[in-house]
Amino acid sequence: MSEPLPDKNFFRIGEVSKILQVKPYVVRYWESEFKTVKPIRTSADQRLYRRQDVEELLTIKNLLYCEGFTIAGARNKLRELKCSSRTEGREENDRSRLMTIKQGLKELRELLD
């Protein structure tokens, strides 16, 4: 079982590999294969992974190790997941707007009656 994600914004590669329970070279390999993981570099040329990167790496690990995807399959699945989450976000936003409009129309009807 992986460690819970500490409450901080940036992680060094050693911390990331400990959280993921994989060797640092695996993290670097995934970084090269999945372009959505983009750590920043310090002036000492050390990798600093953002919280978003670590969450993405956790998803990648789950796809590869638990669900049995290949690298290419995991890449495609991540793309699908991102598209569906964007669509769900838009649907929720649209639903919220429609509810606001509906409420406004009800208030207008009451004013006119």
Image (cartoon, helix red, strand yellow):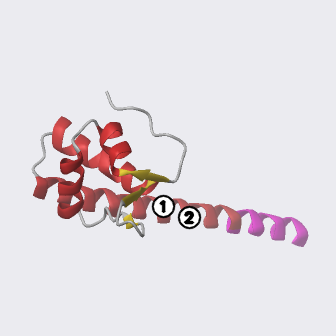
- Front residue of 32/86: it is 32
Cα distance between the residues tagged 1 and 2: 6 Å
Instruction: State the quadrant of the C terminus.
Output: bottom right
Per the image, the residue denoted by label 1 is 89
Location of residue 109 by image quarter: bottom right
Local SS, label 1: helix
> Could you tell me residue 106's position as x and y percent?
77, 64
Instruction: State the quadrant of the N terminus.
Output: top left
Q: Amino acid at mark 2?
A: Asn
Q: Which mark is residue 93?
A: 2
Q: In the rendered view, does 29 fall on the left or right side of 11?
A: left
The reply to whether the magenta stretch includes residue 12 is no
Which range is magenta? Answer: 101-113
Residue sitting at x 9%, y 50%: 70
> Could you tell me residue 14's position as x and y percent?
33, 45
Crowd rating for badge 2 (residues with CA inside 10 Å; few <14, some 14–19, many 20+): few
